[in-house]
Image: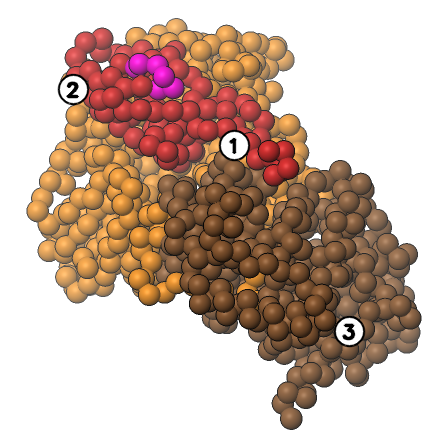
Chain colours: A brown, B red, C orange
């Protein structure tokens, strides 16, 4: 065998897993496509976000919180090894509402979740004045916000670059500009046949290819029930400090630009930005922070989230191809710490591995019945 | 150093840059007027603090950025007008919240 | 709704507008400047005889084209910055901070050329400008620079030098990068070039004028760098094995021009690498048609052939668009286009010779590690090489890894350099490496302007979990 683990996909998800496996002493090959791949990791908004996660599935809330809690340690370790500052700030974040009824509706959902978790779910409701004392630049249309102290943000592109560099530095074999065409069983593992005709052997395979899993998944015994969901993002010129904490739609990045996002649309594989959506995003941001009116938008982009039917991640070992794992989520940044710290235990079948049964593809079979 | 080919002619317009009175000719862009007044550096960069002035004079390079009415604009794309107030772009310093 | 929206009022755009109007189509012509003319004929309608004398006949010739635009069928929207073009013919732009839209049944993109980026050490210093910028300052403001050094290669460098001499501000020196090898390579295109003898003799005339003014020319210069602390103070280089330093107040750079492809890229059109001119060009047919039914491209934005050719191409493209609009029939188009094509061939004959004689210098295609490549985000050539080492196989990944191309110029002055460096580092073809993906806004626009175009009833609401994380 050429390697213990072949990881298909060189985005944040694949690289976080590769980084974790290397830390546990396993040999790893990462297989990545070229510049034109969909690459949700490049379109990311950079939140490390707890609020709203798992309102219908508390196991997801726990998994997300565990990752958010492990993030500081991951960032410190990456910084110690590479000298890169990921600009991690976990000082809380908001979901801002323009409408009191909507704020109240959210509060009720959060309270229900809090009860299901035995009270262990931190959030606060902030009225307009409370929010204003924390965020003096919010506009008069803002009704209030939900605040969670575990929310935060990071520079997602620096995370991608740091993981790319560190996985190589730690001995990972990263191959770019290539595509896995076929994965076939062979004694002791699998044989991966690449688009350039080359092939190599791996004991285990992790399919972390984002939307690319749609091609490979079904042949490996996975249901692969994922689809693209488009999100559009704007970023302004660098501005003096305007906000203290991120909210789920607007955040100020460490370099000074204000990033505006949170749109979602089912448009298949269309990743073009539209005037309709960018204009709506702009109006919403200006309502939230009126001082943004005169700020210049430098760029907009659209990227494709990888959504499962219930929005939750999928962690599944193939029922037909033992040792082949499918990992997918739309929160690769939030879950990066969990993927680096806890997922290797599950991939190597350790007794202290997290229980990820709630995230198997089984749940879709049950739903269908 | 730039100088005018024609030493006379043209309506004069006065405007202000960074607190300094500048005499320009009607029809000048802010960038041209500043170059004519011997101002080379319009701003400093975010990352290294390096001085920058106009480069392309055709609206493509964004090196000649200045601030007018609270907006960042290209000095080469804005015509001068009497008493126009032009400032240097604010230097962005973003520090962690706890520093306050 | 108008028949044709033309973006760019340079020679191609103006000629297209006139042709379209002559055949009865309604036209809206958009341009960023306060008056038509483009960069080549900038301010030509206001230039007095003294300025025309300095700038020369080719510039003065723009007056008749620019004034011919004054006709009721051509609606001019000037000081207009186009920041979005949709394949359906919608053009979104801003005038003095107000966002507007116009829909064209057909669109002609005539956005011309940009100066090729010239990443030399010191190229970001104040008082270092493009040769085109120096010309714009002369045309628009009658401003000339004393004590300037011109660096690079190409016909425009000689034109600028000659104009400066006429203006009584002869440059201190021409530091030229073309080599003797380039001269030899250009000779095989000599026969073609003879068909463009007018252009050639003009060029020789310019060089003679510069020589008569006593301006020293240093050819095949290498190790070119600009020194200075807060502005340019000197140009240093090697020539014939001798290290030289010329003190100066300004440096004007030129290494040829390349198509401005921001709109064609944003439309997702295919682009092809031109090996001769070392740049990308949008794929168009001889009429300027693209694969998008409503989009044509004319002039230097499609391929670099100069102002005269752009004017001809503008008319040709307009004829094709007029057929699509049903204003003329294909037979009429044939008659109109035939003489234009013949003239166009004459204009283009000299190009291969000039391209071979004045190629971009090796130093700017492969800048030293500490040379800034992305001016906006201050990313160096060495940074780009490092990103290639950790897996960057294309410009968009470079953007993600190191912010090159993410600043306000949106890659206009680093894109080609990044493509060249990545191709070399990854040992891939330039075509395969490709370029930055360009998206709207094509020029920065305020959030207020963008927000003004929002539908009144379409506020995006955040569902439970649509965070981008």
Q: Is A3 placed left or right of C117 in the picture?
A: right
| Residue most extreme to the bottom | A369
Q: Chain of mark 2?
A: C
Mark 3, residue position: A356
Q: Are marks 2 and 1 on the same chain?
A: no
Q: Is residue C69 above or below residue A277?
A: above
Q: Is A264 placed left or right of C317 in the picture?
A: right
Spatial CA span between label 2 and label 3: 79 Å
Q: Secondary structure at mark 1?
A: loop
Counting from the top left corner in percent of width and height, residue A238 is at 50, 38
Q: Is residue C291 above or below residue C244?
A: below
Residue C457's tag is none
* Disc 2: CA contacts within 10 A as few (<14), some (14-19) or many (>=20): few
Query: Can the viewer see residue A223?
Result: yes
Counting from the top left corner in percent of width and height, residue C66 is at 17, 36
Q: Which residues are magenta?
A: B17-22
> Magenta residues: mostly which secondary structure?
strand
The answer to which of A1 and A106 lies nearer the viewer is A106
Q: Are marks 2 and 3 on the same chain?
A: no
Image quarter in which the N terminus of chain A is found: bottom right
- Report the residue at 66% width, 30% height from top: C369
Q: Foreground mark, 2 or 1?
A: 1
Query: Can the viewer see residue C388?
Result: no
Residue B92's tag is 1
Q: Secondary structure at mark 3?
A: loop
Q: Is residue B23 above or below residue C337?
A: above
Mark 2, residue position: C48
Counting from the top left corner in percent of width and height, residue C112 is at 34, 41
């Amino acid at each position: 065998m050429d390697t213990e683990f072949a990881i298909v996909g060189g985005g944040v998800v694949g690289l976080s897993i590769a980084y974790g496996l290397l830390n546990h002493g396993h040999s790893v090959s990462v297989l990545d496509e070229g510049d034109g791949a969909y690459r949700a990791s490049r379109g990311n908004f950079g939140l490390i976000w707890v609020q709203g996660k798992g309102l219908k599935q508390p196991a997801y809330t726990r998994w997300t919180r565990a990752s958010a809690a492990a993030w500081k340690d991951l960032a410190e370790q990456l910084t110690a090894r590479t000298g890169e500052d990921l600009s991690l700030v976990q000082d809380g974040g908001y979901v801002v509402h323009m409408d009191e009824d909507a704020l109240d509706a959210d509060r009720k959902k959060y309270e229900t979740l809090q009860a299901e978790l035995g009270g262990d779910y931190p959030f606060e409701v902030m009225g307009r004045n409370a929010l204003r004392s924390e965020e003096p630049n919010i506009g008069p249309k803002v009704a209030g916000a939900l605040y969670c102290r575990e929310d935060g943000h990071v520079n997602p592109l620096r995370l991608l670059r740091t993981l790319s560099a560190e996985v190589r530095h730690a001995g990972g074999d990263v191959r770019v500009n290539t595509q896995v065409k076929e994965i076939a069983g062979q004694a002791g593992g699998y044989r991966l046949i690449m688009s350039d005709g080359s092939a190599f052997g791996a004991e285990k395979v992790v399919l972390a290819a984002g939307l690319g899993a749609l091609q490979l998944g079904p042949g490996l015994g996975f249901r692969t029930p994922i689809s693209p969901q488009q999100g559009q993002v704007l970023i302004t010129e660098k501005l003096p400090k305007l906000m203290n904490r991120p909210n789920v739609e607007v955040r100020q990045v460490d370099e000074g630009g204000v990033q505006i996002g949170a749109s979602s649309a089912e448009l298949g594989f269309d990743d073009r930005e539209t005037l309709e959506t960018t204009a709506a995003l702009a109006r919403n941001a200006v309502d939230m922070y009126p001082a943004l009116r005169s700020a210049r938008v430098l760029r907009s982009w659209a990227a494709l989230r990888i959504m499962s039917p219930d929005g939750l991640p999928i962690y599944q070992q193939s029922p037909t191809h033992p040792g082949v794992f499918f990992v997918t989520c739309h929160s690769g940044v939030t879950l990066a710490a969990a993927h680096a710290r806890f997922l290797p235990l599950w991939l190597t079948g350790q007794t202290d591995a997290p229980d990820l049964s709630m995230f198997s593809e089984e749940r879709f079979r049950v739903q269908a019945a | 150093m730039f100088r005018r080919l024609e030493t006379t002619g043209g309506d004069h317009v006065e405007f202000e840059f960074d607190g300094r009175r500048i005499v320009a000719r009607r029809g000048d862009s802010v960038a041209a007027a500043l170059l004519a007044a011997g101002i080379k550096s319009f701003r400093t960069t975010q990352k290294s603090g390096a001085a920058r002035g106009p480069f392309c004079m055709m609206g493509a390079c964004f090196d000649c950025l200045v601030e007018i009415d609270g907006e960042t604009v290209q000095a080469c794309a804005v015509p001068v007008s009497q008493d126009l107030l032009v400032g240097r772009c604010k230097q962005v310093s973003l520090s962690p919240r706890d520093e306050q | 709704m108008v028949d044709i929206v033309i973006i760019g009022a340079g020679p191609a755009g103006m000629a297209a507008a006139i042709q379209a109007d002559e055949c009865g189509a309604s036209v809206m012509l958009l341009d960023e400047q306060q008056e038509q003319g483009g960069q080549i004929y900038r301010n030509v309608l206001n230039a007095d005889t003294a300025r025309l004398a300095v700038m020369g006949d080719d510039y003065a010739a723009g007056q008749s084209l620019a004034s011919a635009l004054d006709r009721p069928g051509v609606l001019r929207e000037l000081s207009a910055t186009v920041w979005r073009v949709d394949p359906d013919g919608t053009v979104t732009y801003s005038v003095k901070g107000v966002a507007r839209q116009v829909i064209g049944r057909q669109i002609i993109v005539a956005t011309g050329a940009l100066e090729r980026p010239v990443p030399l050490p010191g190229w970001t210093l104040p008082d270092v400008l493009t040769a085109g910028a120096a010309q714009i300052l002369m045309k628009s403001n009658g401003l000339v620079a004393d004590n300037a050094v011109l660096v690079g290669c190409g016909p425009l460098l000689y034109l600028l030098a000659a104009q400066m001499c006429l203006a009584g501000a002869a440059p201190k020196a021409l530091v030229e990068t073309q080599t003797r090898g380039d001269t030899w390579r250009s000779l095989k295109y000599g026969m073609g070039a003879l068909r463009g003898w007018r252009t050639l003799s003009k060029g020789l005339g310019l060089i003679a004028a510069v020589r008569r003014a006593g301006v020293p020319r240093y050819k095949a210069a290498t190790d070119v760098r600009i020194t200075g602390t807060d502005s340019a103070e000197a140009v240093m280089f090697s020539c014939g094995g001798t290290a030289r330093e010329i003190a100066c107040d300004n440096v004007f750079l030129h290494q040829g021009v390349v198509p401005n492809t921001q709109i064609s890229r944003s439309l997702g059109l295919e682009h092809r690498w031109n090996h001769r001119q070392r740049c990308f060009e949008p794929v168009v047919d001889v009429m300027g048609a693209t694969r998008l039914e409503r989009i044509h491209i004319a002039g230097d934005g499609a391929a670099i052939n100069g102002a005269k050719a752009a004017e001809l191409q503008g008319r040709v493209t307009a004829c094709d668009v007029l057929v699509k609009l049903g204003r003329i029939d294909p037979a009429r188009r044939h008659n109109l286009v035939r003489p234009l094509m013949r003239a166009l061939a004459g204009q283009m004959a000299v190009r291969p010779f000039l391209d071979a004689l004045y190629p971009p210098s090796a130093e700017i295609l492969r800048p030293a590690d500490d040379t800034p490549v992305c001016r906006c985000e201050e990313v160096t050539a060495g940074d780009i090489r490092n990103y290639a080492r950790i897996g960057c196989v294309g410009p968009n990944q470079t953007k993600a890894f190191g912010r090159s191309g993410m600043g306000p110029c949106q890659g206009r002055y680093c894109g080609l350099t990044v493509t060249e460096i990545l191709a070399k580092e990854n040992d891939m073809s330039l075509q395969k490496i490709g370029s930055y993906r360009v998206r709207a806004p094509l020029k920065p626009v305020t959030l207020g302007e963008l927000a003004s175009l929002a539908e009144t009833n379409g506020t995006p609401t955040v569902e439970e979990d649509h965070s981008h994380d």
